[in-house]
């Protein structure tokens, strides 16, 4: 977004929201003195942190305040009209949904014109700017009621300006790779400056828990990716988290990206699916600096995997992790409890699978029906209801303190039992897999890494 705005001639500043906030006793503290005045404040939020964005926007000294990101997109494009109300977006003048790199440039052009007109006329009248026709704009303050345009067309990612990594004033953090050993070579991952990189958007698979399910895959060119990696390298970054949903979906492209990352001396990690496992590709990735591959395993129960429409089996999941480890990479399993259909028996199957397969690392989450997922869009199919106060619980995702922070009430198992089993499995996995890693997150999301991850 910042890259597109800058290319269009706008003055842009990118802020890490953690620079203007802190936590005291699990409560968000706003540092008003660090909130710089601006013409347009744009905040991008997921459902898990939209409440923080709302709290920040209210006191921020900006002339126009806009909320965008995946939360707004899935709410405004979703089926539940009761959530498309201003009370859920207090503090903002406008919302923008969809992929808005180009639409937000047009929006800011309109705001510039409006502010310049006010300045020339010496007019302090705060009449609202004309943003008619800008795709993806939602205006709750329009005199005719809620005013919304259709979402912007998906941009051609090969034609967009590159990310403005140099505007990230907070600096890149260290210590985001789990492993200190890649393909038999040891190094200290905790001292590597790390950044995130998207090389593609979309995922063609249909997992029912995912908001990105069955979305068109759109890939950046290798030339774009090399330019982005080069820029990150010049800023001191030496490790990269590739954030694509399914990185290994095209073998030749994956190898080309691995070569680019290796050329600039990067250690890196990515995520994929076990049906995309490939021993030759995995070895090639490891030889070119990939230290960790995360797999969306989700569960150890074949019945639960079928309910999620994951398209995998416990046996295939085991084979995929083994193939990754044999190639010399750290194999991480992403798991979840509490998808509709969960029972005491399926949780036992999950526990047995983990203790038998013993991944290098486990991330254990409690399922929440994020906007955009099939469970959110069609809860009646799963025998559940979405409560009105859901958003107040989403942003607490991962908290350990209260089973009522779970949004769904399942007919097959109680919230209290899910909470109990998660706490029980945390203790077991801490003992059998590795210590809980609490350094990168606020709260306890159940991330475990084996002692092999801490070799110096």
Image (cartoon, helix red, strand yellow):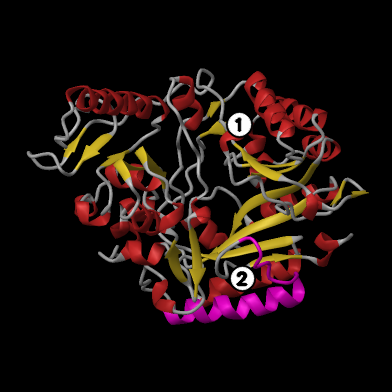
When the figure is inspected, residue 101 is found, relative to residue 193, above or below; the finding is above
Dot 1 falls on a residue whose secondary structure is loop
Q: Count residues near mark 2 (Cα–Cα under 10 Å), then give few for <14, some for 14-19, many for 20+.
A: some
Q: Main secondary structure of the magenta part?
A: helix
Judge from the rendering whether residue 37 lies leftward or rightward of residue 239; answer left or right.
left
Q: CA distance from mark 1 to mark 2?
A: 35 Å
Residue under the image location 47 percent in, 30 percent down: 216
Q: Is residue 384 visible?
A: no
Residue projecting furthest to the front: 122
Per the rendered image, the range of residues in magenta is 414-440
Residue under the image location 10 percent in, 42 percent down: 145
Residue projecting furthest to the left: 144
When the figure is inspected, residue 229 is found, relative to residue 306, above or below; the finding is above
Quadrant placement of the C terminus: bottom right
- x, y percentage for residue 229? 70, 30
- x, y percentage for residue 365? 55, 64
- x, y percentage for residue 171? 64, 45
Q: Which residue is mark 1?
A: 199
- x, y percentage for residue 96? 31, 37
Q: Which residue is mark 2?
A: 349
Q: Is residue 416 magenta?
A: yes
Residue under the image location 78 percent in, 65 percent down: 450
Q: Is residue 439 magenta?
A: yes
Q: In the rendered structure, which disc, 1 or 2, sits on the residue that comes first in sequence?
A: 1
């Amino acid at each position: 977004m910042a890259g597109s705005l800058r290319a269009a001639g706008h003055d842009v500043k990118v802020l890490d929201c953690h620079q203007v906030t802190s936590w005291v006793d699990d409560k968000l503290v706003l540092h008003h003195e660090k909130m710089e005045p601006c013409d347009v404040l744009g905040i991008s939020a997921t459902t898990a942190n939209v409440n923080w964005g709302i709290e920040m926007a209210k006191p921020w000294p900006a002339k126009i305040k806009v909320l965008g990101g995946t939360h707004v997109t899935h709410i405004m494009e979703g089926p539940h009209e009761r959530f498309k109300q201003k009370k859920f977006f207090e503090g903002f003048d406008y919302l923008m949904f969809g992929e808005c790199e180009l639409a937000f440039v047009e929006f800011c052009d309109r705001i510039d014109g409006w502010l310049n007109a006010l300045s020339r006329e010496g007019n302090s009248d705060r009449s609202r700017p004309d943003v008619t026709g800008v795709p993806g704009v939602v205006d709750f303050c329009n005199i005719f009621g809620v005013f919304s345009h259709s979402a912007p067309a998906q941009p051609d990612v090969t034609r967009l300006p590159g990310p403005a990594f140099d505007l990230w004033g907070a600096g890149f953090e260290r210590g985001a790779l789990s492993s200190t050993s890649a393909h038999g070579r040891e190094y200290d991952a905790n001292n590597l400056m790390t950044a995130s990189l998207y090389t593609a958007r979309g995922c063609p698979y249909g997992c029912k828990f995912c908001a990105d399910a069955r979305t068109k895959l759109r890939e950046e060119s290798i030339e774009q990716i090399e330019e982005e990696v080069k820029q990150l390298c010049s800023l001191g970054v030496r490790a990269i988290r590739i954030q694509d949903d399914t990185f290994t979906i095209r073998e030749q492209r994956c190898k080309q990206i691995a070569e680019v990352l290796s050329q600039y001396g990067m250690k890196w990690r990515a995520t994929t699916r076990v049906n995309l496992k490939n021993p030759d590709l995995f070895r090639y990735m490891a030889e070119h600096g990939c230290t960790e591959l995360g797999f969306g395993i989700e569960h150890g129960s074949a019945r639960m995997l079928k309910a999620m429409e994951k398209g995998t089996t416990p046996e295939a999941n085991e084979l995929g992790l083994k193939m990754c480890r044999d190639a010399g990479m750290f194999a991480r399993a992403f798991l979840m409890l509490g998808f509709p259909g969960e029972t005491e028996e399926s949780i036992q199957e999950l526990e047995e699978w983990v203790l038998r397969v013993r991944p290098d690392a486990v991330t254990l989450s409690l399922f929440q029906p994020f906007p955009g997922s099939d469970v959110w869009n069609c809860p009646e199919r799963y025998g559940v209801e979405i409560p009105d106060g859901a958003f107040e619980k989403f942003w607490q995702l991962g908290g350990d303190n209260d089973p009522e922070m779970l949004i769904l009430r399942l007919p097959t198992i109680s919230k209290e039992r899910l909470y109990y089993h998660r706490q029980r499995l945390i203790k077991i996995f801490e003992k059998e897999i590795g210590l809980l890693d609490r350094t990168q997150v606020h709260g306890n999301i159940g991330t475990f890494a084996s002692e092999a991850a801490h070799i110096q």
